[in-house]
Image (cartoon, rainbow, N blue to C red):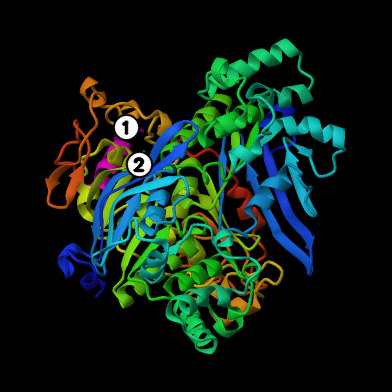
Amino acid sequence: MTAQATPAEAAAERPLLAVDHLVQRFSVPGGLLEAVSDVSFTISRGATLGLVGESGSGKSSIGRAVIQLPPPTLGSVRFDGRELTTMQKAELRLARGGIQMIFQDPISALNPRRRIKDVVAEGPTILGWPKDKTAERVREMLTLVGLDPDSFGDRRPHELSGGQCQRVAIARALIVEPKVLICDEPVASLDVSVQGQILNLLEEMRTRYGLSMLFISHDLSVVHVVSDQIGVMYLGKIVEYGNAGVITAQSAHPYTRGLLDSVPVPDPRAPLPPAMLHGEIPSPMAPPSGCRFRTRCAYVQERCAAEVPELREIDTGQLVACHFPLHGGVAPAAGQAAPDQAALKRASTAPAPGGK
Amino acid sequence: MTAAAVPGATPGSAAGLLTVKGLTCELETPAGPVRPVEDVSFVLGHGKTLGLVGESGAGKSMLARALLGLVPRNAKLSGEVLLNGTNIVGLPAKEHRRVLGAGIGLVFQDPMTSLNPVVPVGRQITEGMRFHKGIKRREARERGIDLLRQVGVSDPVKRFDQYPHQLSGGMRQRVTIAAALACDPRVLVADEATTALDVTVQKQILDLLQSIQQDREMGLIIITHDLGVVAGRTDDIAVMYAGQIVEKAPTTVLFDTHRNRYTAALLRSMPRLEHQPHQKLATIPGAPPRLNALPQGCRFAPRCGFAEPACTEAALELVEETPGHQYRCIRPAEQAAPAPDKAYVSASGRQQ
């Protein structure tokens, strides 16, 4: 960005969503739980960032912190240049029209006592749209997500299958024409045959509305097909971050490798890789010193306990927080390299070339 | 073993460890009778693993429950379930409990609901062995701790006296596996035992089940909706749809030369790591039928791209393709289908 840039150019260049040094702490019985520890990323227009990790890695907390449910403890969330964390309630309510969310369990995400058409009309009602425009848009949206408004509009959520409920949730989120859609495990509770339908629908909506997406899932094979960039999370931190193809084909962090090896491959001849990840994710109440992954890592060395690895760029282009990545060379010792903020900026999301 | 006690039973290995013949479970519902499990037959040999695959509502879990006789009160079971030659369908309750409790172990999907939250896990593990084998409390404790060690629970002595909420999801599932193993069952049924777990823990639990099965030469039935879970870990796979087995074959045969159109569609619709980002996924349109409104003829026909009028005329029978490979379909997929993985990669290349 140069000083001469017009405001329009500046807006086009600046990322649509910028999350900076986000920290989310919850007070729980027994102390303070840090669910997200200093996470930064950006998503540009039309791009999808996939966040992947085990339960307890903090990926859902990030999704919720972005829409300020609840606001993060520290750090900033800028949407289209505006800071969300300091907004007043009324202002935030309007701004949220630009960021919508869909959830894992579509049936419990819908109010069981309301009719489908009223569920979908909720956003417009809050934003004060006129009634006839709302009704018309509700019909359009239901048709768009593949539900006949005449036969589904008056039904209630319990009369619908999980896949149909997720379609309603998508219609409800998109009717207010948001710029960012946060999807928190949107297909985890659906059958395989329905999973593909919903993923295709999300892709269709993304191209139709030029949506940016934050796609949260524990399943790398799902994240991989929808994302331009992937961030791998472990115990509240991003441990590897880069273009989707690089992360799945040339992962450098031992944790990412372990996740990939755990994905069940539908091929009877594929050898079962030996288990690389032993044990389970430690409690975020007392994360290990140094590298948080070291207690489960097969390549752990002394330095891992002493020194926190910073995200740094390696030869294949992704960012890795590991002293001894699987490729790309050993990290320089502490003090020699500042935390690579410049690299973080360079790796911010852009639609993958060739993506639809 | 028990075979000798039953007149007319076929002793020895020819009958297999667990033989299921024409098992049907009929439920009385306000909307009329429905059959969540209909005419299911299979044989599970000693030390063999069977994968039972299908979507929710396909009848997999009801089949697991029917094997153990754990069906709701309004259910009617017919057909035969022969465990070592003894038919356990229709046995008097007391007899049933004796044969079954020690014969078949069951691991459920959600360990938080299958474990009693107000009873220490140790007591839940040893309950079965004390009841069925009359083992005294002190010895049961030792055996229970040993079982916890076998299923990979760290610090088993301490864990033995803890409550389920003090354990993580993976640990809880290990506890339910220990409880299922307590009576040295000959068959272990894992009903979506890893579905609620993280993918990393899922792998650990599947590896554990496999090694336990090999050590004990048990029969293992893995019930799942994920063909990936059973691909490298089973000898045979049965695919269920709307209460019926629609295809059954040795694992590699099922992946390579499946004939049923539903099996083919299911394999095609899985998201895979070989896919390109933003690639359109193959899907199966619509949703499985309701059991009280089953379509005429082939139950998959309304969602199948290859259906023709004949498909909806009469109920389909299982056809034997080669020994051990059976399917239900009158317009089957090409027999010489290449390995699905390869077919998939080339198809994706064209799609983009």
Which range is magenta? B339-352
Q: Which residue does the numbered mark 1 point to in the structure image?
A: B299
Q: Residue placed at 68% from the left, 72% from the top? A: A335
Within the image, what quadrant is residue B7 found in?
A: bottom left
Subunit ID for the residue under disc 2: B
Say whether residue B273 is visible: no
Residue B262 spot, x, y in % from top left: 30, 38
Q: Residue drawn 24% across and 39% down? A: B260
Residue A175 vs residue B168, the one in the foreground: B168
A205 relative to B220, above or below: above
Q: Amino acid at mark 2?
A: Gly
Q: Is residue B187 above or below residue B136?
A: above
- Report the front residue among B250 and A62: B250
SS type, badge 2: loop
Q: Residue B183, relative to residue B157: is it above or below?
A: above
**In the image, what residue type sits under mark 1?**
Arg
Relative to B39, is B273 on the left or the right?
A: right
Residue A20, horizontal then vertical, whole percent: 72, 51
Instruction: Identify residue for label 2.
Output: B243
Q: Position of residue A237 (x, y in %)?
A: 64, 60
Q: Residue at 53% of width from left, 25% of height from top? A: A145
Q: Chain of mark 1?
A: B
Residue A264 pos. (x, y %)? 39, 56
Q: Residues within 10 Å of mark 1 (few under 14, many from 20)?
A: many
